Image: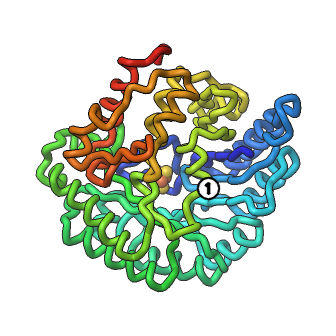
């Protein structure tokens, strides 16, 4: 079974922190041309039956962006029909659409549901009007509440929301209020999944120009950012949300099938501008030049990647962790990890090590980048194969 990612690179307006590949002020003709190119790409990358029919079956489809909720019902229908023509979409396939609250109505949501979309990922980002405005978002809190209620009225049972922490002028109190609102929505059973992302400031963005100095007084301190993360873990855990990945929390049974494909290093197709895919142990990236994509939707480059490290890193981002014995055997590496070699991390409450399984703690999640690199270098030293 495989997953499919579809990139829709159009937005009403660029948010001040965003460095994703997306374009604003695009007319319908360009979007229609893009959809033609996308369908061409889908039709030319069918599964290879010589490699086993299982590759034909799709367990999740994710429309990301950009703002895929900008598409009209008929545009979305064209893409889904092309997928159906070329792949075997499982009857229980998770089909997610990212939604910007500024772009939908109850009418549109009901139509999306009818088309087969069964999961929404709502880009709410904050419940503070000032922060939303200062981040260049086009929606306000009222829109946030509206889209959540409309999603429920449109019979979406699987709704996820995205929140950002570490925004300029975001205090711990503001973040706490956001989380309280989320918990209230959770207790009303309106939300099943929450993703929290720490703001990262990229050079070529409005924020990048304004907050080039990471010590800018408007930016929360590192300690405050850690406190925000811990606060979210604590409050969401109290509402029986399972912290199943560093940035993701879900009610039991509502973990994202699609994102688990990435974290478990399973195969996925990527269609559309700048989309990535992982198949046959190879990572590829489509061109991120819109004109080039419209002219040749099959233009891609193969990415250099260390898939052994990728697996190590991605699995340690998951709460269930990584079975180091299975991992080293599968990759023909020498297993040099022992309780003794890991003791210092265990004592610092960064890591758990039981039944050959390594798991980062919530404290460990906070320093995951450096911690995972340190742990990986420990296997590297004793390995019998080149990492
Ligand atoms: S809506 Fe999303 S993709 Fe579009 S500019 Fe804002 S953050 Fe970026």
Residue 10: percent from left, percent from top: 57, 50
Q: How would you rate the neighbour count of disc 1 (Cα within 10 Å): few for under 14, some for 14-19, many for 20 or more?
A: some
Nearer to the camera, 350 or 32: 350
Image quadrant of residue 95? bottom right
Residue 101 visible, this angle:
no
The residue that disc 1 covers is 257
Horizontal side, residue 187 vs residue 166: left or right: right
Q: Is mark 1 within 8 Å of ligand 1?
A: no
Colour option used: rainbow
303 in relation to 226, above or below: above
**What residue is at 49 percent from the left and 32 percent from the top?**
310
Total residue callouts: 1
382 in relation to 2, above or below: above
Looking at the figure, which quarter contains the N terminus? top right
**What residue is at 58 percent from the left and 28 percent from the top?**
330
Residue 24 visible, this angle:
yes
Nearer to the camera, 61 or 151: 61
Residue 76: percent from left, percent from top: 73, 58
Residue 58: percent from left, percent from top: 76, 49
Nearer to the camera, 265 or 385: 385
Image quadrant of residue 165? bottom left
378 in relation to 353, above or below: above
Q: SS at mark 1? A: helix
Residue 216: percent from left, percent from top: 14, 47
**What residue is at 47 percent from the left and 62 percent from the top?**
123
**What residue is at 30 percent from the left and 68 percent from the top?**
234
């Amino acid at each position: 079974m495989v997953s499919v990612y579809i990139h829709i690179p159009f937005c009403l307006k660029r948010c001040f922190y965003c460095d994703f590949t997306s374009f604003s002020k695009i007319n319908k003709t360009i979007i229609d041309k893009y959809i033609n190119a996308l369908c061409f790409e889908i039709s030319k990358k069918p599964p290879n039956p010589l490699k086993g029919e299982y590759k034909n079956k799709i367990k999740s489809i994710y429309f990301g962006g950009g703002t895929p909720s900008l598409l009209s019902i008929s545009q979305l229908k064209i893409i889904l029909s092309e997928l159906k023509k070329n792949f075997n979409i499982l009857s229980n396939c998770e089909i997610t659409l990212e939604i910007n609250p500024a772009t939908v109505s109850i009418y549109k949501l009901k139509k999306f549901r009818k088309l087969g979309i069964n999961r929404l990922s709502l880009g709410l980002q904050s419940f503070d009007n000032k922060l939303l405005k200062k981040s260049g978002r086009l929606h306000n809190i009222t829109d946030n509440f509206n889209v959540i209620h409309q999603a429920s009225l449109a019979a979406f049972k699987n709704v996820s929301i995205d929140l950002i922490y570490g925004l300029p002028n975001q205090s711990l109190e503001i973040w706490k209020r956001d989380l309280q609102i989320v918990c209230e929505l959770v207790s009303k059973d309106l939300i099943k999944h929450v993703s929290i992302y720490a703001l990262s400031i990229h050079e070529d963005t409005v924020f990048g120009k304004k907050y080039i100095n990471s010590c800018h007084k408007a930016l929360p301190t590192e300690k405050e950012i850690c406190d925000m993360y811990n606060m979210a873990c604590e409050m969401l855990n109290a509402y029986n949300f399972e912290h199943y990945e560093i940035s993701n929390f879900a009610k039991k049974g509502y973990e994202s099938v699609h994102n688990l494909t990435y974290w478990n290093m399973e195969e996925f197709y990527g269609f559309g501008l700048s989309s990535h895919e992982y198949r046959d142990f190879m990572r590829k990236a489509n061109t991120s030049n819109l004109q080039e994509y419209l002219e040749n939707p099959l233009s891609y480059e193969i990415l250099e990647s260390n898939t052994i490290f990728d697996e190590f890193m991605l699995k340690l981002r998951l709460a269930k962790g990584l079975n180091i014995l299975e991992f080293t055997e599968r990759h023909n590496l020498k297993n040099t990890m022992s309780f003794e070699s890991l003791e210092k991390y265990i004592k610092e409450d960064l890591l758990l090590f039981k039944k050959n399984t390594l798991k980062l703690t919530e404290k460990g999640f906070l320093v995951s980048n450096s911690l995972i690199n340190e742990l990986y270098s420990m296997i590297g030293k004793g390995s019998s194969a080149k990492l």
